[in-house]
Amino acid sequence: MSIKTLFGFLLVSLFVNSSALSQIYEDRVYSEHVHSVRMFPQGSQQDSQLDAPVISLSDSRSLVLLFDDIAYDPEQYSAKLIHCDADWKQSALRNNDFSTNFNEFNILDYGYSVNTRIPYIHYSFTVPRVTKSGNYVLKVYRNRNENDVVLTRRFMVYEELFNIGASIVPPSQSEDRRKAQQINVMVNYSQVDLVDPTTQVKVIIRQNQRWDNAMFLAKPTFLNQSSKSIRYEAFDGSNTFKAGNEFRFVDLRFIRATGVNIADIKVEETVILANSLVDKPRPGGVYSQYLDLNGQYIVYTNDRIGGNPEVESEYIYTTFHLQAEPNREIYMLGALTAWGKNPESKMVYDPKTRLYSTSILMKQGWYDYHYAYKTADGYDSESIEGSYFETENEYEVLVYYRALGSRYDQLVGYVDLHPNRRRI
């Protein structure tokens, strides 16, 4: 090999590696026939699938990935772990820095659906344990070809190196007190010698397991080096979220009867069709408390009680309807649409019915959702759903730390805030 050829090869390798490091990894499904993708800590309770994909390094539980393939043709699926920094770009760690095994795993646990109109193959994969804390992405691909990606899913592994305190309080700005929630955070780093807490520590808060409106707390409001504590109690609204409203929902656990908020359901030989009741905007009025799943969904069927809902639940082609003024971009938000990322999340206006609608293929279960306008600054759900301080939301506080000379961001603290927790 000539010097010129070798130099060109090194340049190409450097470009490929730098491109991989600069890529931001997201929760995304790349295959049209893959549905119901979920990742959560293993648990014996049915509602464990509502929990965020976060575990500690010392946790006895593992994370599990579930998904269905309605192509009904067994594929050779493989999975790989990618370690990321706090900004979800690939870190500088090598595979053997965080994995004790060869970093390619075959997904061998699958089962065929049982007597369903739309047949599917249900896959299950237990995520391997890692040795380093931080952000991770599980990449699933076909035939051991990493370029043929089926899906990517984020998860977090934390170590209890920092002590974290967090609370939900009324906003400092008086005009937001009736419709927003402020998250105050206190970080104690007594186990670590920090040179510069403002640059070595990153604090991120997310609401209802969403990443699209996650908040990065850039500036601490108080630093106390004698007690080794940092406080984030901003007075400018930088740590304040719109509280929103309790989520709308549909109950698709039945096919022989109409569940809550379902107008009609039609069972045919090869497909099941359903229509939701017509939703209307609700920005005004008083706050009404009821049970919801904070935007998540749960797979379950009441038609085959005692069986395995993962392989016995039907897929239902469900159409949602919203009565709203035309000529606006309206999206359906929730885990069922990947918080507005799936194509089906965009509502289409029909001038004949004067309704917005969208149709989604959904596995039997209970589904939460909101409607929102698409704006230049993101999604505005307040104009359709309203916003009330009393709304029950889930908040997660993630604290990252990078030691001097380190090649990655450690996730050194995690708090899950569930005040007045209410689930179905």
Image (cartoon, helix red, strand yellow):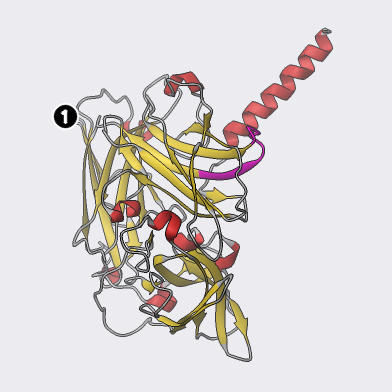
Residue that sits furthest to the left in the current view: 227
The disc labelled 1 sits on which kind of residue? Ser
Residue 3 at what x, y percent from top left?
81, 8
Image quadrant occupied by the C terminus: bottom left
To which quarter of the image does residue 288 belong? Answer: bottom left
To which quarter of the image does residue 176 belong? Answer: bottom left
Relative to 76, is 189 on the left or the right? left
Relative to 410, is 1 on the left or the right? right
> At 41% across and 31% down in the image, what residue appears?
128
| Circle 1 residues within 10 Å: few <14, some 14–19, many ≥20 | few
Residue 169 visible to the viewer: yes
**Looking at this view, is 161 or 319 the one in front?**
319
> At 26% across and 52% down in the image, what residue appears?
45
Residue 255 at what x, y percent from top left?
43, 74
**Looking at this view, is 7 or 116 the one in front?**
116
Asked if 236 appears above or below 357 in the picture, the reply is above
Which residue is the site of mark 1?
Answer: 226
Relative to 215, is 395 on the left or the right? left
Residue 352 at what x, y percent from top left?
63, 91
**Looking at this view, is 291 or 235 the one in front?**
291
Residue 375 visible to the viewer: no
> At 51% across and 25% down in the image, what residue appears?
103
Residue 94 at what x, y percent from top left?
51, 21
Asked if 320 appears above or below 32 in the picture, the reply is below
Asked if 10 appears above or below 275 in the picture, the reply is above
Is residue 146 inside the magenta stretch? Answer: yes
Magenta highlight range? 143-152
Residue that sits furthest to the bottom in the current view: 352
> At 27% across and 59% down in the image, what residue appears?
182
Image quadrant occupied by the N terminus: top right
